[in-house]
Every structure is written in structure tokens, then in C-alpha cells.
Image (spheres, rainbow, N blue to C red):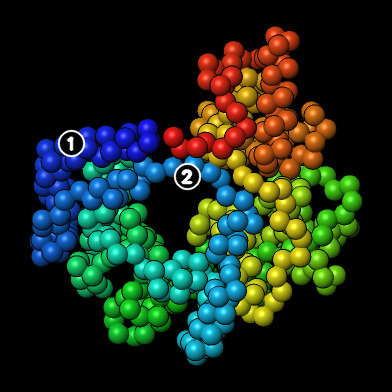
Amino acid sequence: MRKLFLLLAVLAAFSAHAQTGFDSWLAAFRQDAEAQGISAATLDAALTGITPVERVVELDGRQPEFLQTFADYLGRRVTADQVARGQALMTEHATLLDAAEQQYGIPKAVLVAFWGLETHYGTVLGSLNIPASLATLAFEGRRSDFFRSQLLDALRIIDAGHVDAVDMNGSWAGAMGHMQFMPSTFRAYAVDGDGDARIDLWQSLPDAMHSAANYLKRAGWRAGEPVAIEVRLPEGFDWQRGGVHRLPVAEWMALGVQTVDATTLPAVTGCAAIVLPQGWQGPAFMVFDNFDVVMRWNRSVNYALAVAQLAQLVAGGGALVAPAGEVGALGTAQLKTLQQALNEMGFDVGTADGLLGPRTQTAIRRYQVVHDLPADGYPAPSVLAHVEQTHAAAAVAGKLILAPAPTFAESTSQPDSGE
């Protein structure tokens, strides 16, 4: 309830602020947009009468209460229905997908996988007006410069005649169309796939698929190479190598890394890395240069692996072999507690913010090495329990590097109840 009251208070304060400031901000923005060559007709159509969208403010400020395990992430997005639907659509649109694959080198199963993960194959395109949402985010202040530039690009798209302002709908953050392109991505990579002299990522599948394929090709896609392959790691594998070291495939093979089905690992021109999305107890993947390309689309390891897995299943391949890994995920409050404890024991994570980044993963690995734990850098619940126990002992012995924050002693290993 406390969080609900705080949210309502924030929204109320924003509404009052918006009523007094938004119109002035919008008038100044309109002058700037017109000075940059955007037509008065487009500005009238897109900006007249818009008001801040409180739902957008709410979603922009929302932080996830819990991290999501790879198993949970994959289970919610790569389902039997999702695979079956993808296979049916790949058959239905075979001519289009084959043409895109031939022109850009992107496998049709990969394009279908992106389509499925982004919009459930076009069934969830988003219903919020893009100019209104982006104006809200540009005015609201958090990342305002970024969203201001996106709004200008959205207006340029309308000005070019690709879509009417009233029809430019999408997600709260400005992503739009079958493949959820941001306006800047649209302007840089979207192409006319059906030859009608306009680019319609909402209604034209040729435009959407060719645009996605063009993006991936220009991002560095290597034709004929995989994104990720599930592998079996040898006994005694150095877990510190996971996600960090890149080696030629032949060197990984020499270390004893094998595919789970004993097939030959692919011969690729670049190096490969081992990714452990759910720690040492979960599945392991060898990832290649195309994994980096997918990560440019969405900076999430779980997302990139989900693309690879859905594409594999849609193409008729097999499901994962390895077990899911340790059950349960930390809440963001718990991760903040973990970070704070590591800082106080001399394992520097930077600011304890509840976000899992490379610096936190490195600190966890350092802690795991010192305490003879599998050094995978993964914040499993068992790692938090171990850190809390060690921290408590260090506090009693007076061996903390930093003074403990007042709230740390009040924290527990239980998930945040939200109350």
C-alpha cells in the first residue's frame, strides 16, 4: 500500500507540474521542430491538443521488483503455442521470408523469432500514440534529451508521408510496428519492402521484414553462422571464463567443450564465448558474432538467447537439454542488499542500485573466488545467503572495509513484499 500511495502522490505532483509547464514546453519545442524543417501541417496533426500521458509516466518510473531467471524468461516467451504459430506463419509467408533471406542473408526462422518476441507475430503492436508518448517523456525529464530526439524523428517520419500522426501508435516508450522500431531506428534502417514508395511498419509485412533484415545485416550479421548453441562443459571447467573470455572455437573444443547432442561445433571466422544465463547449475551456451548483433537490437542476454532458441524451435530443432539451474531470483531490493554487502567487504560494485551490471558480476566473481565458490558471477539466492552470513561474521569481527549502512542490518533474504 505504501508504494501505491507514493505512486499516486508522484502522479498527482506530475499532473500539477504538467498543467503549468507542458504547454510552454510544447510551444518552444514546436518552434525548434519547425526551425529544423518539419512542416506546420505535421506539427499541427501530431501536436495539437496533446497532453502529458500519465500512464507513460507511470511505466517510465516503474522498476521491476524481481529479477527474472533465464528459465522463467524463456518459459514465458518461448512456448509451444509460440513455436507452432511461428512455424505456421513461416510457411504462410515463405515467399516473403525467402526473398528477405536471399537479399540480406538473415535466416527466415530468425526473422520469425524476432517477430514473435517483439509483438507476438503482430498481435500486440501497442496502442499509445507515439508523438504524445514521446512528448511526455521528453518533457518529464528522465532521459529527456533522448526522447526529444526520438520525437523529432517521429515527426520526420510523419512529414515524409510514411504514416499519419493519428495512426502512429506503439509502445509507451516509442517503439512501433511489427518489429518495434524506435523512430531513430526507423529512419536509419527501415526500407520499402513492397515497392509502394512508403514505409509502413504497421500494416505492411514486407516493409517490416525487410526493415528488420536490413537492420541485422547492417549491424554485422554473418550469414551462415549461428547465434548461440547449447553446449556441455567439461568437468572442472573454469567458471570465470563464462561470459568474459572469447576464444576460437577450436580452443574451446580443446578444453573439452562439446555440443549437447555431440554434433560438431560450427566453423566460424570469429571467436566465441560461453554464456551462463542462470549460473553454473543452469544451461551453458556458446555464443558467436551474431549473438552480438542480436544484443545490439536488445541489450539483454536473456532476450538474445530467447531469439536463438525460438528460431531453433521454429526451424524444427530441439529444445534445451540442461536443467534450468537454481530456482528463484533475487528481488531488486535483495540485489541492492547484496551489492551493499559486497561493497562493505571490499568487493567494489560501485553504487548499490539494485541493477545487475558487469561491475556487480565482476565483484560477485571476485567474492566467489575468495570463498572457493563456482565463480560464475551469477547472483543466485544461495550467493546472497552466503554473502549475508560472511558479512555478519565480518561485522562482528570488525573487518568491514566500509561502515555498514543503517538499513543493511534490517534486510533479510526474503523477497520484498511490496508493502
Judge from the rendering whether residue 237 lies leftward or rightward of residue 174; answer left or right.
right
The answer to whether 2 is drawn above or below residue 164 in the figure is above
Q: Is residue 327 visible?
A: yes
Q: Which residue is mark 2?
A: 64
Q: Is residue 393 above or below residue 20?
A: above
Residue found at x 69% / y 19%: 392
- Asked whether 311 or 157 is in front, the reply is 311
Residue 348 in view, yes or no: no
| Amino acid beneath label 1 | His
Q: Quadrant of residue 24?
A: top left
Residue at the (54%, 73%) spot, across then down = 82
Residue reaching furthest top? Answer: 398
Q: Quadrant of the C terminus?
A: top left
Q: Position of residue 304 (x, y in %)?
A: 58, 60
Kind of element beneath mark 2: loop
Q: How many numbered circles does the render carry?
A: 2
Q: Residues within 10 Å of mark 2 (few under 14, many from 20)?
A: few
Mark 1 secondary-structure assignment: helix
Residue 63 image-quadrant placement: top left
In the rendering, at what x and y percent does residue 280 appear?
76, 48
Instruction: Assign the N terminus to one quadrant of the image.
Output: top left
Q: Kindly identify the residue that appears in the image at 60 percent across and 40 percent down.
A: 330
Point out residue 48 in the picture as x, y percentages from the top left corner: 10, 57
Q: Residue at x 64, y 79 (%)?
A: 315
* Front in this rendered view, residue 378 or 1: 1
The amino acid type of the residue labelled 2 equals Pro
Q: Label 1, on which residue? A: 17
